[in-house]
Image (cartoon, rainbow, N blue to C red):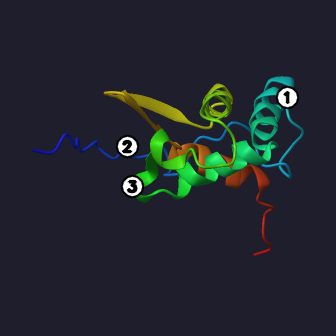
């Protein structure tokens, strides 16, 4: 018997776009709070091990990954846990404990917001 639980798909509010942490860089200058939020995200991703872990979770089948599946990044397990904690604190990952394992997920709105932040408007 499977312990798999099907989670409902949440639709973004409003016009279908994810609510970003900050406006696109080309829209207007950041407020102090927006700059703090964006800096926290970029600082967390500025470490190569964290970037690899974030990428491993984001690209994993089903949109989530067990820590047991992504911990082969060339550092010890306590260091992996430290980096995953930093990614969670930056708002880039969420986690859920299932038995003895922790599963990590990148919220789709985070990826959309990061993409929107860095996307320059195109000429029509």
Front residue of this view, candidates 108 and 71: 71
Side of 4 relative to 88 (left or right):
left
Front residue of this view, candidates 18 and 75: 75
First-in-chain label (2 vs 1): 2
Report the number of discs. 3
Q: In terms of secondary structure, where does tag 2 sit? A: loop
Tell me the mark number nearer the camera, choosing from 3 and 1.
3
Distance Cα–Cα, label 2 vs label 1: 29 Å
Distance Cα–Cα, label 3 vs label 1: 35 Å
Residue linked to disc 1:
31
Q: Quadrant of the C terminus?
A: bottom right
Distance Cα–Cα, label 2 vs label 3: 15 Å
Q: Write down the quadrant of residue 97 in the picture.
A: top left
First-in-chain label (3 vs 1): 1
Residue linked to disc 3:
62
First-in-chain label (2 vs 3): 2
Residue linked to disc 2:
10
Side of 86 relative to 110 (left or right):
right
**Callout 2 touching callout 1 (CB < 8 Å):** no
Q: Write down the quadrant of residue 10 in the picture.
A: top left
Residue 7 shows in the view = yes
Q: Residues within 10 Å of mark 1 (few under 14, many from 20)?
A: few
Side of 64 relative to 118 (left or right):
left
Front residue of this view, candidates 82 and 116: 82
- At x 47%, y 48%, the residue is 69
- At x 55%, y 44%, the residue is 109
Front residue of this view, candidates 98 and 68: 68
């Amino acid at each position: 018997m499977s312990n798999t639980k099907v989670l409902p798909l949440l639709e973004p509010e409003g016009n279908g776009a994810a609510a970003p942490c900050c406006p696109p860089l080309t829209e207007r200058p950041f407020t102090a709070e927006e700059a703090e939020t964006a800096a926290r995200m970029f600082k967390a991703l500025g470490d190569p091990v964290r970037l690899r872990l974030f990428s491993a979770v984001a690209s994993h089948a089903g949109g989530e990954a067990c820590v047991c599946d992504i911990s082969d990044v060339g550092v010890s397990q306590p260091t992996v846990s430290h980096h995953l904690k930093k990614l969670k604190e930056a708002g880039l990952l969420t986690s859920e404990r299932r038995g003895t394992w922790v599963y990590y997920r990148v919220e789709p709105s985070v990826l959309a917001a990061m993409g929107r932040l860095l996307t320059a408007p195109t000429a029509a």
